[in-house]
Image (spheres, rainbow, N blue to C red):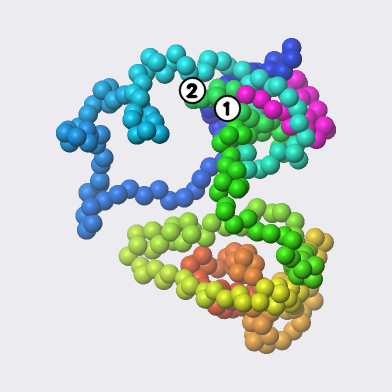
C-alpha cells in the first residue's frame, strides 16, 4: 500500500472527514547523471559566491527576489516564516461548481483522496456518491509544503480525486502571448465541413493505453543494448509532407482514413494480420502489406505490441509494416 503524503481532514460546513492524500501520477522518463566526457566521473555542483568564487555553506545562504529596477530584496528565514500560510490540517470546501465549467488549463497535479481510518469510511463514501450524482466538483483550499493551494475535488473511479489548480493570475491571457490570433471569419463553410468530416472519421473512444511514450521506450532500449554491448539502430525519420492546399490535404486524409477502416465509436476494427473471416480477405503477403499501409503509425505500433514484436519502439514505419505482416503470417500459419 502506498504511503500517504498528506493527512488531515476534509471540511465543509459542520462536517469534517479524516482523509489522506496519495500521489495519483508518476513520470517514467529516464533520469540521467552527468559525467566528464570519456570517463565515469560524476559531475557535482557547488554553491559559490559569484563575486569571490568561494563555496558558500548552505546555512549561510539567504533568499531574495529581484525588483523590476534590477535591485534585490533579501529576506531572512524568520521574515518568510511570519508571512507563510498557517499550517492547518484541513482542506476547506468553499463552493460546489459544475465540473464541465472548469477549463483543464487550470489543473496542476492529481492526488487520490482516501478515508484515513475505518470511522471515516461511511461519511467519505456518502460525500463521494453525492458529488458524483450532482455532476459538480468541490472547490477547496489547503496548505501543502508551505504553499497555499487552490483545488477541486471530483469523483474518479469510485473514489474522490483532488486536483491542485493554478490561480487565475497564474494562467496567461491568450492575447498577451499570441499576437496573431487567427480570424475565423475568413473560413469557408465547405472547408470547415471537410475538417469536421476528418475529425468524425478519426473519432474513437478514449483509451489512454493506446498511446505510448515512444521516446522513453527507445531510450530504455538504447540503454539495454549498450549494457549488452550490442548495436542500437535508431529509427529512420519519416519525411514530413508539405501542405500546400489545405482542402486537398483534408480530403486526402479523409480518403485514407476511410480506406483503412473507420475508428469511430461502434465501428468494428479489422486486424490486418488475420486472414479469412473476421479479418481481411485471403490473399498474398502483398495484399496484407497494402492493408497495413492504410493504418496510422499509432495503430501499427498497437498491432506490433499485440504481436509482441521486439524492438518495435525503434522501428521506422516501413520496418513496423514489415514486422507486423511477417508476425501476422506466422500467427496465421
Q: Where is residue 117? Give x, y as percent.
A: 65, 19
Rendered residue at 58%/16% (across/down)? 89
Residues at marks 1 and 2 touching, judged by CB atoms closer than 8 Å: no
Label 2 Cα crowd, 10 Å radius (few <14 / some 14-19 / many 20+): few
Rendered residue at 23%/52% (across/down): 36
Q: Is residue 66 left or right of residue 272?
A: left
| 133 inside magenta stretch | yes
Judged left or right of residue 231, residue 212 is right
Q: Residue at x 33, y 30 (%)?
A: 71
**Quadrant into which the C terminus falls:** bottom right
Q: Position of residue 86 (x, y in %)?
A: 53, 15
Q: Local crowd at mark 1 within 10 Å, few (<14), some, or many (≥20)?
A: some
Q: Which residues are magenta?
A: 122-141
> Mark 2 — residue?
146
SS of the residue under disc 2: loop
Asked if 2 appears above or below 31 in the picture, the reply is above
Q: Residue at x 66, y 25 (%)?
A: 140
Indicate left or right for 76 with 308 as reference. left
Q: Which mark identifies residue 149?
A: 1
Amino acid at each position: 500500500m502506498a504511503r500517504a503524503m498528506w493527512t488531515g481532514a476534509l471540511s465543509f460546513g459542520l462536517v469534517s472527514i479524516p482523509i489522506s492524500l496519495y500521489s495519483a501520477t508518476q513520470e517514467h522518463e529516464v533520469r540521467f547523471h552527468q559525467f566528464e566526457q570519456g570517463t565515469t566521473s560524476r559531475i557535482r555542483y557547488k554553491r559559490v559566491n559569484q563575486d569571490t568564487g568561494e563555496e558558500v555553506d548552505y546555512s549561510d545562504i539567504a533568499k531574495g527576489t529581484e525588483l523590476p529596477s534590477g535591485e534585490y530584496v533579501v529576506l531572512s528565514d524568520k521574515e518568510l516564516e511570519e508571512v507563510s500560510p498557517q499550517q492547518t490540517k484541513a482542506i476547506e470546501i468553499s463552493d460546489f461548481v459544475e465540473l464541465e465549467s472548469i477549463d483543464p488549463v487550470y489543473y496542476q497535479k492529481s492526488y487520490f483522496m482516501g478515508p484515513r481510518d475505518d470511522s471515516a469510511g461511511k461519511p467519505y463514501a456518502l460525500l463521494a456518491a453525492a458529488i458524483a450524482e450532482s455532476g459538480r466538483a468541490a472547490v477547496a483550499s489547503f496548505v501543502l509544503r508551505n504553499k497555499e493551494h487552490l483545488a477541486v475535488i471530483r469523483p474518479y473511479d469510485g473514489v474522490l480525486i483532488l486536483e491542485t489548480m493554478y490561480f487565475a493570475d497564474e494562467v496567461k491571457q491568450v492575447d498577451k502571448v499570441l499576437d496573431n490570433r487567427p480570424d475565423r471569419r475568413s473560413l469557408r463553410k465547405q472547408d470547415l465541413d471537410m475538417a469536421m468530416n476528418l475529425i468524425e472519421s478519426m473519432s474513437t473512444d478514449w483509451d489512454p493505453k493506446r498511446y505510448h511514450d515512444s521516446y522513453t521506450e527507445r531510450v530504455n532500449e538504447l540503454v539495454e543494448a549498450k549494457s549488452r554491448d550490442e548495436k542500437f539502430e535508431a529509427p529512420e525519420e519519416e519525411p514530413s509532407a508539405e501542405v500546400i492546399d489545405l482542402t486537398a490535404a483534408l480530403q486526402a486524409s479523409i480518403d485514407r482514413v476511410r480506406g483503412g477502416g473507420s475508428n469511430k465509436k461502434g465501428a468494428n476494427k479489422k486486424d490486418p494480420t488475420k486472414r479469412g473471416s473476421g479479418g481481411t480477405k485471403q490473399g498474398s503477403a502483398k495484399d496484407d502489406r497494402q492493408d497495413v499501409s492504410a493504418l496510422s503509425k499509432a495503430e501499427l505500433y498497437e498491432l506490433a505490441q499485440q504481436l509482441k514484436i521486439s524492438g518495435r519502439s525503434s522501428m521506422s514505419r516501413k520496418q513496423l509494416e514489415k514486422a507486423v505482416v511477417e508476425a501476422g503470417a506466422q500467427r496465421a500459419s
